[in-house]
Image (cartoon, rainbow, N blue to C red):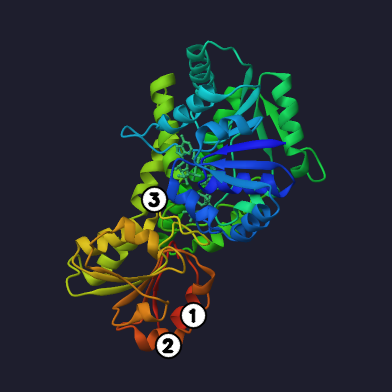
Amino acid sequence: MKITVIGTGYVGLVSGTCLADVGNDVLCLDVDPAKIKILEEGGIPIFEPGLQDMVRRNVAAGRLHFTTDIERAAHFGTVQFIAVGTPPGEDGSADMKYVTAAARNIGKYMTDYKVVVDKSTVPVGTADAVRAAITEELQKRGVSTPFSVVSNPEFLKEGAAIDDFMKPDRIVVGCDDEQAAHNMRALYAPFQRNHDRMILMDIRSAELTKYAANAMLATRISFMNELANLAEKLGADIEHVRRGIGSDPRIGYDFLYAGAGYGGSCFPKDVKALIKTAAVDAGIHLKVLNAVEEANDLQKHVLANKIKARFGADLTGKHFALWGLAFKANTDDMREATSREVIKDLIAAGATVTAYDPVASAEAKHCFPNELRLSYADNQNAALDNADALVIVTEWKEFRSPDFDNLKAKLRNPIIFDGRNLYDPKTVRGLGFEYLAIGR
Ligand code: NAD
Ligand code: UDX
């Protein structure tokens, strides 16, 4: 099948590459010439495990192409995936300007039947807006080329994106005509594995499903974080509690890890957008979700508050080693990363910070331009030089089993603030560390 993917970010590039990998002919369009240049030169503009090799393999096979040419992209695919960003606007609602622009570009140039697929995370009603934008462009040209609009939200996780796309738990498709449903079934047949994973529904339900999934997961995490804060005060260990409740199949173990707050390009923005949609479009105040957001905003300051409780509110002259900048392991994405809040809090209290992340330092430098109190180390050991304590913000594998003797020798004080509960408290404390984790 010939497919155009509009937007070559995390979702567009992964989707386009995986669709090419099963034999489709895929053209990826982006309005950012710098991204397309990197891709045309054989690189990839993001860090995502396994993606570079897969892109190269499919480019070499002649199935994956990149362009900034909007007209060529509109002609190319029978299926046109819209995978552009939907960042939060000033009021928290999803900013739809990129989606609308992508839809208009299709309408401006299409000359035959298209299935236009919303893969971006978009508010309920977007498919109608996409349909209206395309129709308006066709009318301007005086043509009435047929097209269908489908909602097909994406559930991949950064860091595991290829596996998530190639072996999906479910493929949600919101659709109101048989021709588009037929195309979507054919497109996703190679990803079904041993049973049908496609869940067909009406378009509005599909649009809401994506927000509901992220809101549910964010709620679990915020609730665990609150329980962790409680466990800490009551002398319990949230990790034991997690195992105790996760063993109930009605609860399950996934997404029950307490930590220093959730970040990333999806949970924070999607929680905000759902709150806003509910209020504006339906006149409903989502009490639970508002509390989830508030709890997470507070949780991102828990690490810095622990540091200030230990060293005093004025951290002038103190220096901290910080391990992990990305919002989670296996990505270089710094969007809404907890590290940003921790660093801001420490610097505002007068401290200096040396950070180390296996891949996200370059991104972090864009977030903190000209910040003289923040420096970057080339490895985790170098970050420890002259540090009063170690602060762990991201759960990279390489932080899981450090040389504790070396750690103790290098730190001015043997203190670890662990925002991801990487170590067994008894063991670490037995080695002579003060260990301040989350909920234990
Ligand atoms: P991103 O910001 O990484 O990439 C978006 C890309 O679209 C950018 O490269 C941008 O230049 C390009 N673009 C913008 N307007 C364009 C246009 N008119 N034509 C062509 N290209 C255009 O975004 P992302 O993280 O890939 O997210 C995309 C969407 O998918 C969002 O709605 C997001 O909520 C959703 N989503 C993201 C993830 C994730 O893990 N990142 C997972 C599931 C869903
Ligand atoms: C999320 C959704 O999981 C995915 O389905 C959707 O398509 C995009 O948004 P992503 O943002 O890539 O994916 O990362 P995810 O693994 O969900 O983690 C999000 C945040 O939650 C991270 O900051 C992570 O550290 C935090 N988290 C996750 C916890 O604090 N505890 C957990 O148990 C799980």
Please name the residue that numbered disc 3 is placed on: 336
The amino acid type of the residue labelled 3 equals Glu
**Image spot of residue 245 (x, y percent):** 60, 53
Residue at 41% x, 83% y: name it. 407
Q: Residues within 10 Å of mark 3 (few under 14, many from 20)?
A: many
Please name the residue that numbered disc 1 is placed on: 402
Please name the residue that numbered disc 2 is placed on: 406
Q: Quadrant of the C terminus?
A: bottom left
Decide: is 296 above or below 388. above
Of marks 3 and 1, the one in the foreground: 3
Residue at 50% x, 46% y: name it. 9
Which of 331/239 is in front? 331
Whether the residue carrying mark 3 lies under 8 Å from ligand 2 is answered with yes
Which of 85/239 is in front? 85
Contact check, label 1 and label 2, Cβ < 8 Å: yes
Q: Regarding mark 2 in the picture, which secondary structure is present there?
A: helix
Is residue 247 in view from this perspective?
A: no
- Of the numbered discs 3 and 1, the one sitting upstream in the chain is 3
Is 9 positioned to the left or the right of 371 in the image?
right
The amino acid type of the residue labelled 2 equals Asn
Cα separation, mark 3 vs mark 1, equals: 27 Å
Q: Quadrant of the N terminus?
A: top right
The amino acid type of the residue labelled 1 equals Pro
- Of the numbered discs 3 and 2, the one sitting upstream in the chain is 3
**Image spot of residue 260 (x, y percent):** 41, 58
Which of 302/62 is in front? 62
Number of the label disc, if any, that sits on residue 241:
none
Decide: is 228 above or below 312. above
